[in-house]
Image: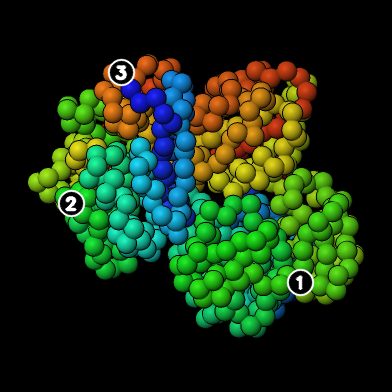
């Protein structure tokens, strides 16, 4: 629960909620961003004031942060109310709105854009920070990935203080960034994309890899022993004492079992018994439209969001092996204007399936698939894609704005 | 025409592979195989020797630190310079392009390059990010080029190289010219999969690798690459 607010902060909070409600009523998203912006203009310290006195966890990384935040929220709800930015508004405006909307919540699970981690560490004084992974993402507008890891390392060294870090032991960039902290809980969360960590982030030498282990032969940076891991058999998570917690997730793929492991590790730091938290994760069926199932004209579509090479590879790992696939690619500002990264994705696993491509940059996909020997059909939009596929189940993989366009076609399904 | 397998070497994917650079290797292999030409695509890491006697070498783009390490290792190794002197084709992108020159800047320092191309690179006033297009030298027979650039460097060409193109959109070397070319070596700021958008450039490199004239290569279906080129040129003219 946030402490008593000053009259100015109360006024800012009220204005924030009004602005958000107005934005919602006029049909422009959920109003998180505009509401937060209004509140922070009236009281620039509003985020800090609203976070004060609450138990906060920040969750950041290139991929999986929205889902992991959702899992963590579900786990923490076992012990109390949780404020969370569940609409993916992951910058300080969104965090401010999330906290303003849930004044009574004792806990807060906040998804944090990678570039705002330092600001949030200072403003929200989190009890726990979860760091999932770092890989290349929208390089025409964001930082190159090693530079981002260096920034995190600096930020954590300066500001982490009493915070406990839950970090992915399988990602060398994450390990390097987090290893400056005193209190780290390591999770073997896997790494589906290793091309950004062929080189030691600490010294520039080659990393040696043997199965899941990795180490730098020059400076000694290596994979820490994880306390938490995804079970090698079946669907489960193994905790620090070797105890296994069974998962029955509705969300697909190994990557979501890893997200669940991180959420359970975080929740246990807040005093939640993982055995009590694990079943709650299976109640999550979709996350802001991700993994949602929708039906149209006898086609059952499952919607997968994938924004970068690691995300596309993870999606290909999740999709059913024989079903038709729709791929949709845009390159608007939030997607990044550069489509080069599709050449970092191996599409050969789609050979032999029905593949339909759409989105603003469908021709980029057509050229890409031709190079990989994948047969495809090019169509104008998701309606035409559905018409091009026989009735039955369909997997849909789209990047950010392409995904939002498809969601809009299905009444912004959550 | 060469009858043996065409050996395509992508150098240092561990250091220089930031923007889909693998695409150029894939496109070359695809275009060769579509014509029934045997290819052996090889990826050679920076802790391995650069193979002698390959038919074509590719260098990609990368961040400052890896770029400096790559230049140092290539200088130590020496095989790429020998290949260039022997007339083997090389396509170098962005950071890889800069390090083929006499010198380049990384992390605020000037580093010696391989000196394969007569050019020098330094830092520009701002980062060049966005679509790039231009008209190539008529001698190359490539027509217009299209790509995406993302770099902080500027490159100054010496007497012994020709610009790859005159810039019509974007920055390239300096806002006037883009890339460089000498013998069978081509450097460009069109990053990542430049060859996907420029199939004639891909074919020129293949022809050089095979020791034939590009018009001796059998035509292949370029419907989709041509559609992509038209879309990109169209997007630039709409933006004007």
Which mark, residue B207? none
Q: Are marks 3 and 2 in contact (CB under 8 Å)?
A: no
Callouts 3 and 2 in the same chain: yes
Instruction: Point out the image quarter for the N terminus of chain A.
Output: bottom right
Asked whether the viewer can see residue A51, the reply is: no
Residue lying at 37% horizontally and 41% vertically, measured from the top left: B54
Structural crowding at the residue carrying mark 1, measured as other residues with C-alpha within 10 Å and reported as few (<14), some (14–19) or many (≥20): some
Question: Disc 3 marks which residue?
Answer: B216
Residue lying at 30% horizontally and 56% vertically, measured from the top left: B78
Question: Disc 2 marks which residue?
Answer: B119
The residue nearer to you, when weighing A211 against A262, is A211
Q: In terms of secondary structure, where does tag 1 sit? A: loop
Q: Position of A102 compared to B54: left or right?
A: right
Which mark, residue A227? 1
Q: Position of residue A217 (x, y in %)?
A: 54, 71
The residue nearer to you, when weighing A378 against B58, is B58
In this rendering, the label closer to the viewer, 1 or 3: 3
Q: Position of B93 compared to B40: left or right?
A: left
Callouts 1 and 3 in the same chain: no
* Residue A134 falls in image quadrant: bottom right
Whole-angstrom CA distance, mark 2 to mark 1, is 53 Å
Q: Are marks 1 and 3 in contact (CB under 8 Å)?
A: no
Whole-angstrom CA distance, mark 1 to mark 3, is 62 Å
Question: Disc 3 or 2, which lies upstream in sequence?
Answer: 2
Asked whether the viewer can see residue A314, the reply is: yes
């Amino acid at each position: 629960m946030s402490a008593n607010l000053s009259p100015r902060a109360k006024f800012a909070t009220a204005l924030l909620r009004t602005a958000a409600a107005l934005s919602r009523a006029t049909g422009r998203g959920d109003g998180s961003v505009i509401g937060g912006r209004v509140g922070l203009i009236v009281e620039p310290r509003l985020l800090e004031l609203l976070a004060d006195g609450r138990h906060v966890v920040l969750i950041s990384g290139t991929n999986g942060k929205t889902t992991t935040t959702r899992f963590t929220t579900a786990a923490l709800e076992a012990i109390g109310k949780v404020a969370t930015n569940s609409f993916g508004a992951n910058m300080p405006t969104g965090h401010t709105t999330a906290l303003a909307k849930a004044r009574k919540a004792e806990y807060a699970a906040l998804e944090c854009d990678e570039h705002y981690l330092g600001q949030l560490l200072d403003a929200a004084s989190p009890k726990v920070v979860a760091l999932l992974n770092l890989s290349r993402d929208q390089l025409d507008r964001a930082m190159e990935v090693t530079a981002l890891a260096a920034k995190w390392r600096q930020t954590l060294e300066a500001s982490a203080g009493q915070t406990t870090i839950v970090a992915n032991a399988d990602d060398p960039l994450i390990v390097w960034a987090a290893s400056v902290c005193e209190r780290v809980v390591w999770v073997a969360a896997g790494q589906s994309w290793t091309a950004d960590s062929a080189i030691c982030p600490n010294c520039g030498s080659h990393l040696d890899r043997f199965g899941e282990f990795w180490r730098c032969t020059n400076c000694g940076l290596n994979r820490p022993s994880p306390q938490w891991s995804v079970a090698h058999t079946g669907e489960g998570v193994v905790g620090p004492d070797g105890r296994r917690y069974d998962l029955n997730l509705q969300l697909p793929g190994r990557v979501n079992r890893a997200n669940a492991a991180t959420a359970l590790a975080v929740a246990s730091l807040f005093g939640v018994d993982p055995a009590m938290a694990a079943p709650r994760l299976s109640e999550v069926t979709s996350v802001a439209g991700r993994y949602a199932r929708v039906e149209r004209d006898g086609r059952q579509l499952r919607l997968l969001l994938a924004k970068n090479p690691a995300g596309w590879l993870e999606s290909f790992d999740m999709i059913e092996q024989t079903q038709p696939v729709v791929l949709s690619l845009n390159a608007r500002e939030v997607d990044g204007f550069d489509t080069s990264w599709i050449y970092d994705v191996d599409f050969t696993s789609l050979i032999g399936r029905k593949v339909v491509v759409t989105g603003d940059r469908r021709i980029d996909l057509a050229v890409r698939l031709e190079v990989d020997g994948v047969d495809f059909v090019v169509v104008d939009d998701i309606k035409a894609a559905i018409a091009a596929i026989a009735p039955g189940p369909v997997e849909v993989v789209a990047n950010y704005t392409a995904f939002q366009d498809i969601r809009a076609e299905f009444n912004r399904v959550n | 025409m060469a009858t043996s397998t065409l050996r395509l070497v992508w150098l240092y994917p561990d250091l220089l592979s930031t923007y889909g650079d693998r695409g150029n290797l894939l496109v070359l292999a695809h275009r060769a195989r579509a014509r029934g030409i045997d290819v052996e695509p090889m990826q050679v890491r920076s802790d391995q020797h650069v193979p002698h006697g390959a038919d074509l070498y590719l260098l990609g783009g990368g961040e400052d630190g890896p770029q400096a390490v790559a230049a140092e290792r290539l200088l130590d190794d020496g095989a790429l310079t020998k290949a260039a002197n022997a007339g083997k084709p090389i396509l170098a992108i962005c950071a890889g392009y800069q390090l083929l020159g006499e010198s380049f800047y990384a992390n605020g320092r000037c580093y010696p390059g391989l000196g394969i191309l007569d050019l020098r690179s330094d830092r520009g006033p701002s980062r060049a990010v966005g679509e790039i297009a231009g008209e190539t030298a008529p001698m190359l027979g490539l027509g217009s080029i299209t790509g995406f650039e993302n770099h902080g460097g500027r490159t100054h060409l010496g007497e012994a190289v020709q610009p790859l193109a005159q810039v019509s959109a974007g920055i390239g070397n300096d806002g006037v010219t883009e890339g460089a070319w000498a013998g069978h070596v081509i450097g460009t700021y069109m990053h990542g999969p430049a060859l996907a958008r420029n199939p004639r450039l891909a074919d020129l490199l293949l022809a050089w690798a095979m020791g034939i004239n590009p018009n001796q290569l059998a035509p292949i279906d370029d419907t989709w690459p041509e559609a992509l080129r038209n879309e990109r040129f169209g997007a630039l003219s709409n933006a004007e």
